[in-house]
Image (cartoon, rainbow, N blue to C red):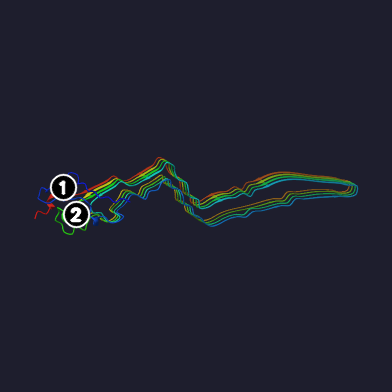
Amino acid sequence: MDHRSVPDPVHRVPLDRKAQLGNDLPGSWWMSADSLPRFLTHTGDNSAGNGGKGYFAGSLIHSSYAGFEPLNVVWPGVHATALAHQTNIAYFDQSASQIAGVGGDGGNWNAALGGSVGAFGSVGIGAIATGGNSAGNGGDGYFSGAMVHAPVAVYAPINIAVAGNNSSANADQTNNVVFDQSAFQMGGVGGDGGNGNAAIGGGLSVFETGYGPHLPIGWSGLSHGGMGSNVIASGDNHAGNGGDGYFYGGIVHASFALYYPINIAVAGYNSTAYAEQTNNVVFDQSAFQMAGVGGNGGNGNHAIGGTADIFSSIFDLIGSDVITTGNNSAGNGGNGHFSGSMIDIDVAIYVPINIAVAGYNSTAEAHQSNNVVFDQSTIQIAGIGGDGGHGNAALGGDFAMQLLSDLHLLDLA
């Protein structure tokens, strides 16, 4: 907050002297108490680095069920041999990474600048603001709804060997199983932003010569004039940008995996039965779901405003919100917005059955080998937006105004 009075004379206007046409020049160029209302100048709503924001309202649900029920049965008869072998290596992860709201990110080496205000004369309330500066940006996100990841895995191998009188039965089962049922779910998103960005405002100077009875101009009612409220703003500067996102609704990833191998060897009287089963199974059922999105933004961006010079001796010619030196933005990206649902439902059922039955004085062999991979991947991205250039510049500013009365307007009476 700067309040400035300028006691120095105007350039090339000497004090305590007569004008060429006989008018008295003002004896002092100090601002009167009435001409300096509170909050005269605001030298920038500066911020650098940025990032932040996120917000999430709703539910994140990860509900997993894993059932593993191996059964191994041996039933030998009289003078019989029954062998049942079962080896199980199972990995159930049922992973889920759920991220909501998000936002964040922001550049490095950013600068947000304001300031540099000079005023001479009667200026209205809130007359000068040297930029709503921000640099690095990123941020935003927002997510309202629910993320649900509910995988169910059932794994129940059964191995049975039954041998009759004077018989031999062998049942072998080997299982290598991996159920991951992964899900990576994001909501809202936003974020990102450039590096080395600068948002610049400031550099304002105002000169107003209207001072009531000291005026050389013979206009009536000019003493209450001057510059209106919010006269000058040197740019709503942004740099790096990115951000935005928003997502309303639900993301659902529901995976179901059923793996049910059965291995049976039955040998009758004086018989031999072999049943072998080998299974290598991977169910991943991956899902990458992203909503809202937005973000990204360039590097080395500049958003520049400022540099406005005004010299005015004609009151009431300058109203409110007269001058803005640009709503500057650089790097951009952002936006996205997604309302609705993303649903990825994967069901994997794998039920191999291996049976060997040998009758009277017989031989039965059953061999089964399985290598199975179910991925059922899904990548769902909605809303999107984002990206932005590098080394961009959004420029405003460099405004100069001079409003002076002509000599023929002077009151010679």
Residue 112 in percent (x, y) is at 38, 45
Q: Quadrant of residue 150?
A: bottom right
- Tell me how far mark 2 sits from mark 1, CA to CA: 15 Å
Q: Nearer the viewer, residue 318 or 227?
A: 227
Residue under circle 1? 15
Residue 251 in percent (x, y) is at 55, 54
201 vs 337, left or right, is left
Instruction: Identify the image quadrant of the C terminus.
Output: bottom left
- Circles 2 and 1, Cβ within 8 Å, touching? The answer is no
- Mark 2 and mark 1 lie on one chain; the one further toward the N terminus is 1
* Amino acid at circle 1: Leu
Q: Nearer the viewer, residue 352 or 89?
A: 89
Q: Give me the disc on residue 373.
A: none
Residue under circle 2? 211
User: Circle 1: is it few (<14), some (14-19), or many (20+) Cα within 10 Å?
Assistant: some
Q: Tell us which disc is closer to us: 2 or 1.
A: 1
Q: Secondary structure at mark 2?
A: loop
Residue 98 in percent (x, y) is at 56, 51
Residue 19 in percent (x, y) is at 12, 48
Q: Secondary structure at mark 1?
A: loop
Which residue is most to the bottom? 221
* Amino acid at circle 2: Tyr
